[in-house]
Amino acid sequence: HAADAHRTDLMTITRFVLNEQSKYPESRGDFTILLNHIVLGCKFVCSSVNKAGLAKLIGLAGEINIQASTCSNECFGEEQKKLDVLSNEVFIKALVSSGRTCILVSEEDEDAIIVEPSKRGRYCVVFDPLDGSSNIDCGVSIGTIFGIYMVKDDHEPTLADVLQPGKQMVAAGYCMYGSSCTLVLSTGKGVNGFTLDPSLGEFILTHPDIRIPKKGKIYSVNEGNAKNWDGPTAKYVENCKFPKDGSPSKSLRYIGSMVGDVHRTLLYGGTFMYPADKKSPSGKLRVLYEVFPMSFLMENAGGQAFTGKQRALDLVPTKIHDRSPIFLGSYDDIEEIKALYAAEGKKE
Ligand code: P6P
């Protein structure tokens, strides 16, 4: 009954990672415990995001949570926390309580969080708890993005432990809150996608061994910044619209939510770009918890990630909220972009 196997042989994300980790005899299950706490955070955010629309509808989200007069006093004045603030608190609490982290960097917090000694472990987690949250009200997919570094020993944690090139990450992933809740993860050996089955409260393997098409028919960039682009970016986008070799034009798809744009690029192929421009010479996206995790996934799916100057994962961040330009996606498409930048470099 092979056809029924998937119905009875439930490959949950925990089981999947346990299987992967069991290949390392020295593994003590710490990573699996850490991941389970990240998964808990994602389940919470998924349920809150789904309710946010409803809460907005019945007038709860974002305003003072005024209950019917029958409600006792403590209901009045309860401010509905913004979803990204709430998500951040949930992830920080989940990660600290895992007892497997020593440093946390969140898009929501100016400073890194050094975990108290009694709760410390060997992992540093960098994350954006709710990337694209400005899109919640219009129902566009948003997501949590995370990257994981491992420290070698239990020295007093410092920022140096997280100001590491992305190639040092041991794992990275995102959870997309859209029509379904999909968690895409890589631990350095390929990329796998899991979809939350709300009836089970489990993430089930639905996209085993994701491989990005070698070449794509889609480009994804905010064309509204075109007047500020540098030469190579402008040339690449021009080639997408008016191919010199007479091939069909590419389609433009851009929803302005990185997780949604990257997830489509990973599954369908093509490129996602947030280039540098005259206004923002380092681009807009953050190195640690947007550029590195998505670049890590792309390379593990057979794609590439380029900053305009170098392989994205080779970048060494100097500050925890550094930004970088990013071009990521299908291997051959990124090769074209690299060639345009190389040709520009030769002119200078
Ligand atoms: P722009 C969302 O605010 C975000 O950080 C990413 O999720 C998204 O890719 C990007 O900014 C969109 O930026 O300038 O095109 O609106």
Image: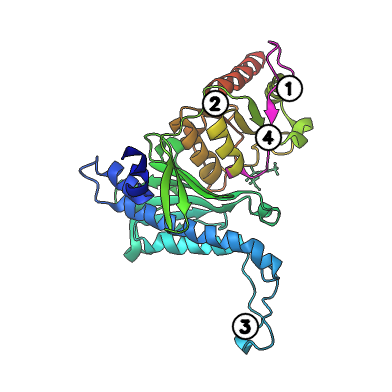
Mark 4 or 3 closer to N-term? 3
Which callout, 1 or 3, points at the residue further toward the start of the chain? 3
Q: Amino acid at mark 3?
A: Cys
Q: Marks 1/4: CA distance?
A: 13 Å
Mark 1 to mark 2 CA distance (whole Å): 17 Å
Going from the N terminus, do you reach mark 1 or mark 2 first?
1
**Label 1–label 3 contact, CB within 8 A:** no
Does residue 133 appear left or right of residue 157 in this picture? Answer: right
Q: Secondary structure at mark 2?
A: loop
Q: Does 92 appear above or below 149?
A: below
Q: For this view, does 44 lie left or right of residue 231?
A: left
What's the distance in space between the residues labelled 2 and 3, CA to CA? Answer: 52 Å
Q: Identity of the amino acid at label 4?
A: Arg
Tell me which numbered mark, 1 or 4, is placed earlier along the sequence: 1
Residue under pointer 3: 75
Q: Secondary structure at mark 4?
A: loop
**What amino acid is found at the position of numbered circle 2 in the picture?**
Ser
Is 256 magenta? The answer is: yes
Marked residue nearer the N-terminal end (2 or 4): 4
Disc number for residue 253: 4
Which residue is most to the right? 227
- Which numbered disc, 2 or 3, marks the residue that appears first in the sequence? 3
Q: Secondary structure at mark 3?
A: helix
Looking at the rendering, the quadrant in which ligand 1 lies is top right
| Start-end of magenta stretch | 242-259
Q: Which residue is mark 2?
A: 330
